[in-house]
Amino acid sequence: MKTIALVAFDQFTDIDLFLMWDILGRNRHDWQVRIVGQQRELRSAHGLLVATHGALDEANRADVVLFASGREGVPAALADPGFMGAFQLDPGRQLIGSMCAGALILAALGLLPGRRASTHPDARGALSSAGVEPDERPLMSIGNVATAGGCLAALYLVGWMVERLFSAEKSLQTLRPVLPSGQYDLYEKLIASSILQGRCG
């Protein structure tokens, strides 16, 4: 069984974490998904208190590590030595991804191949200031590292992850339960093309 760590912090963007959590939490046979953080409880940007399942260092042993985002949460996490110092991630053996401004954390950890990443449009300036070229695609992947821009791009990030671990068909099966009724074909084509077009190596 694969292990997936969703990395969160105080003031994380609610939908970035919860959409990934909801999609991945529906399958308990192929993987185990856990929310990890620096504290036992984290408060979201909208004020929701969330209990974490484990400490940040669990991410170092996980098969997949996906970082949430947060307009205020990411800058605070970047400035926290305890948070940043907890990670010893290896894209040679792990799939690593980020939502929106979470790409800034990957950049600070030296985990962005080619110093390019997708992120939320509002975070592109900060990404450029960090020496990373913003990519306008909703998903960009190079090898085992992927970045997504825009909250609903979590569909693409999760789809990319499942496709890398299993298959394209498994990816669509995983996402289908959350797609709008009567629009499966439309969304499945969009998801498949976004993953394909985002692939850079």
Image (cartoon, rainbow, N blue to C red):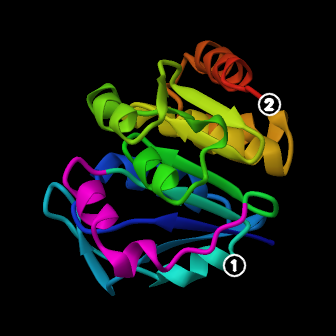
Secondary structure of the residue carrying tag 1 is helix
Residue tagged 1: 61
Q: Position of residue 151 (x, y in %)?
A: 38, 36
Which residue range is magenta in the image? 70-90
Between tags 1 and 2, which lies in front? Answer: 2
Q: Is residue 27 left or right of residue 21?
A: right
Residue at the extreme right? 167
Q: State how many labels appear.
A: 2
Q: Residue at x 53, y 30 (%)?
A: 179
| Up-down relation of residue 120 to residue 26 (above or below) | above
Left or right: residue 162 versus residue 105 is right
Q: Secondary structure beneath disc 2?
A: loop
Q: Position of residue 152 (x, y in %)?
A: 43, 33
Res. 171 image quadrant: top right
Q: Quadrant of the C terminus?
A: top right
Q: Is residue 75 above or below residue 119?
A: below
Residues at marks 1 and 2, CA–CA distance in whole angstroms: 24 Å
Q: Is residue 82 magenta?
A: yes
Instruction: Say which residue label 2 marks.
Output: 201
Q: Residues within 10 Å of mark 1 (few under 14, many from 20)?
A: some
Q: Amino acid at mark 1?
A: Arg
161 or 24, which is in the foreground? 161
x and y percentages locating residue 187 in the rendered image: 59, 19
Say what amino acid the circle numbered 2 marks: Gly
Within the magenta stretch, is there residue 4? no
User: Who's the residue at 33% across and 36% down the image?
Assistant: 129
User: On screen, 100 above or below 125?
Assistant: below
Question: In the rendered image, which quarter is residue 79 located in?
Answer: bottom left
Looking at the image, can residue 174 be seen?
A: no
Q: Along the horizontal axis of the image, is 19 left or right of 142?
A: left
Q: Nearer the viewer, residue 70 or 135?
A: 135
Q: Residue at x 67, y 35 (%)?
A: 141
